[in-house]
Image (cartoon, helix red, strand yellow):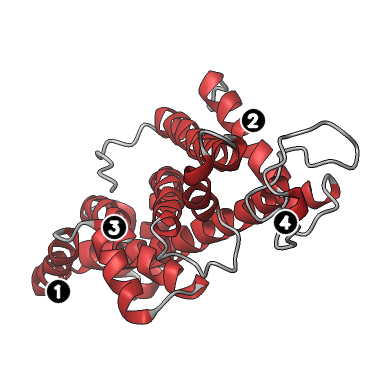
Amino acid sequence: MMILNAKFLIGMLCLGLIVGMALGGQFLSPYDPDEQDLMSALEPPTIDHDGHIFGTDHLGRDVFARMVSGARVSLLIGACVVTLSGVFGVMAGALSGYWGGLRDVVVQKLVETFWAFPPILLALAILAFLGQSLANVIFALSVQRWIPYCRIARAQALVLRNKDFVAAAQVMGAGTSWVLYKHIIPNLISTTVVIATFSMATAILAEASLSFLGLGVPPSIATWGGMLSEGRTYVTTAWWVAVFPGLGIFVTVLGLNLLGDWLRDTFDPKETLNLR
């Protein structure tokens, strides 16, 4: 039975604020995130109806409008990375554990090879080779994030393949695909959801880091990491340019981590989640 506690409530509040801003933030600000007005550069936050509620940056762009755009980019990248890496990792781990033998060894050697590279350096290398684009960022962040799913799925598949219901299905002539989709993978869902929550938080943080370094999505797309990079120059004279995107990253990652902790406490998975 799921018990709601402070972690769930605070996590949902944090995540709800960011999702709400991403979905309906444009109704609170009439400004375009890319519209420049040098005469209004570095205006402080105001509560005036037609003013800039989060102020403007050094090019006169509305910070709140860019925050909305950054929220959409971060949530899109996080969701895509979790989906791609989760599907591939669970399938690879389930097959590896169910098959066993030489094929299991090959998959685990592949896991060890990818796990040897620092995640951010691997993503930087991929983006330096492929170039900057939204699709390339998603690919670069997904290349290694399938490993936690694979390891947990394999560990549980090794146990599940010896269960009576799996043996019964095999005796009745069920093939590998049937056993995986009907008996193995459904039993991995609870643990996978826990991993996905933490993985989305790390993916959003990694995307912000790449954008801060200037190697994430193209500069023409407003992102929280890019806003932080631009605002650090003015942090002593126009604090709002860097503080608000930093708060956006903090609130999103905090909300996802709190939800992940609540899910982990609820489902009580036995495996240790080693995410990077």
Find residue 13 and name its label. Answer: 2
Q: Which residue is mark 4?
A: 38
- Mark 2 secondary-structure assignment: helix
- Mark 3 secondary-structure assignment: helix
Indicate the position of residue 51 as horizontal and vertical percent values. Answer: 84, 41
64 or 76: nearer the viewer? 64
Give me the C-alpha separation between circle 4 and circle 3.
Answer: 35 Å
**Which amino acid type is marked by label 1?**
Arg
Mark toward the viewer: 3 or 2: 3
First in sequence, mark 3 or 1: give its number: 1
Q: Residues within 10 Å of mark 1 (few under 14, many from 20)?
A: some
Image point (51%, 33%), residue name? 236
223 or 162: nearer the viewer? 223
- Do the numbered discs 1 and 2 sit on residues whose CB atoms are within 8 Å? no
**Which amino acid type is marked by label 4?**
Leu
Mark toward the viewer: 3 or 1: 3
161 or 52: nearer the viewer? 52
First in sequence, mark 4 or 3: give its number: 4
**Which amino acid type is marked by label 3?**
Ile
- Do the numbered discs 4 and 3 sit on residues whose CB atoms are within 8 Å? no
Mark toward the viewer: 2 or 4: 4
First in sequence, mark 1 or 2: give its number: 2
88 or 176: nearer the viewer? 88
- Mark 1 secondary-structure assignment: helix
First in sequence, mark 4 or 1: give its number: 4
Q: Residues within 10 Å of mark 4 (few under 14, many from 20)?
A: few
- Do the numbered discs 4 and 1 sit on residues whose CB atoms are within 8 Å? no
Image point (64%, 30%), residue name? 13
Indicate the position of residue 15 as horizontal and vertical percent values. Answer: 60, 38
Image-based side of 30 in relation to 131, left or right: right
First in sequence, mark 3 or 2: give its number: 2
Q: Which residue is mark 3?
A: 120
